[in-house]
């Protein structure tokens, strides 16, 4: 694994030996770090270049641990969202990540960030996977609806999620589909975590959306 510290965001990347099928970008949840997405990327064993990004905000999680975040919620306002989106875009550009051969994957707040990044990008990615995610700014989705038209989206959500309720995942499905995205929602009998069954669904989605090896 190679780490990058001189970019707009701290990042890590790894790829299997030999040819790859494209890129998979991982955005972690609130209070986590990119290292917490590493096991997910490794478990899939998918032949792609994996890029893991760290959120720019420091989040205190108890007396002895600090994680990272993407934005702060102040009522209806999401402070720092636009700045984080720009940092994600700048970092991916610096790493020469080709959008049309890339699937964006995010968990929880990272899923919201992944969608926000897609909305502000110039090129629609090969796919978007939101794990226990939500739509951060519905009005921006309406304003940028052309960016999600025909966007392939996989939404995975636990029906017992007590952090991002299942209804938020269902609302995300409805919003994306109503604006032309090719979205599907897969429900799981789990709470707020990435279950093994979600990993299997993600593998299938990557296999569908990224070009085969030549």
Image (spheres, grey):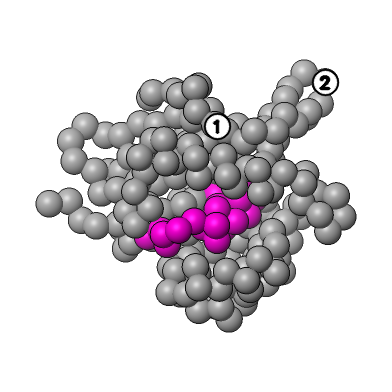
Of tags 1 and 2, the one toward the viewer is 1
Residue at position x 69%, y 59% in the image: 136
Q: Is residue 50 left or right of residue 141?
A: left
Q: Which residues are magenta?
A: 106-126
Residue at position x 50%, y 45% in the image: 89
Q: CA distance from mark 1 to mark 2?
A: 25 Å
| Helix, strand or loop for disc 2 | loop
Residue at position x 49%, y 56% in the image: 121
Q: Position of residue 31 (x, y in %)?
A: 70, 35
Q: Among all residues in the image, which is located at the extreme top?
A: 64
Q: Is residue 178 left or right of residue 48?
A: right
Residue 184 makes an appearance in the image: no
Q: Which residue is mark 2?
A: 63
Q: Position of residue 78 (x, y in %)?
A: 76, 51
Q: Is residue 156 left or right of residue 151?
A: right
State yes or no: residue 111 in magenta.
Answer: yes
Residue 81 makes an appearance in the image: yes
Looking at the picture, tell me which residue is in the foreground, 95 or 110: 95
In which quadrant is the N terminus drawn?
A: top left
Q: Is residue 6 left or right of residue 99?
A: right
Q: Position of residue 197 (x, y in %)?
A: 48, 55
Q: Position of residue 16 (x, y in %)?
A: 26, 34
| Helix, strand or loop for disc 1 | loop
Residue at position x 83%, y 58% in the image: 76
State yes or no: residue 1 in magenta.
Answer: no
Looking at the picture, tell me which residue is in the foreground, 161 or 85: 85
Closer to the chain start, of discs 1 and 2, is 1
* Residue 40 position (above or below residue 210): above
Q: Which residue is mark 1?
A: 9
Tell me which corner region of the image, top left, top right, bottom left or bottom right, holds residue 124.
Answer: bottom left
Classify mark 2: residues with Cα within 10 Å, few (<14), some (14-19) or many (20+): few
């Amino acid at each position: 694994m190679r780490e990058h510290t001189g970019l707009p965001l701290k990042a890590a990347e790894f790829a299997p030996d030999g040819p790859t099928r494209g890129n998979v970008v991982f955005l972690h949840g609130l209070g986590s770090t990119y290292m917490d997405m590493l096991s997910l990327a490794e478990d899939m064993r998918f032949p792609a270049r994996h890029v893991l990004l760290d959120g720019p905000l420091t989040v205190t999680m108890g007396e002895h641990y600090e994680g990272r975040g993407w934005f702060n919620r102040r009522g209806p306002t999401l402070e720092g969202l636009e700045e984080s989106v720009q940092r994600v875009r700048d970092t991916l550009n610096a790493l020469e990540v080709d959008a049309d051969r890339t699937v964006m994957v995010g968990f929880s707040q990272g899923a919201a960030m992944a969608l926000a990044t897609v909305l502000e990008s110039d090129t629609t990615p090969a796919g978007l996977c939101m794990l226990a995610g939500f739509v951060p700014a519905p009005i921006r989705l309406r304003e940028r609806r052309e960016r999600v038209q025909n966007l392939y989206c996989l939404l995975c959500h636990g029906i017992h999620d007590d952090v991002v309720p299942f209804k938020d995942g269902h609302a995300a499905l409805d919003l994306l589909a109503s604006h032309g995205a090719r979205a599907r929602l897969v429900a799981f009998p789990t709470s707020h975590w990435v279950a093994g069954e979600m990993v299997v669904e993600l593998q299938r989605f990557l296999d569908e959306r990224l070009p085969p090896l030549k």
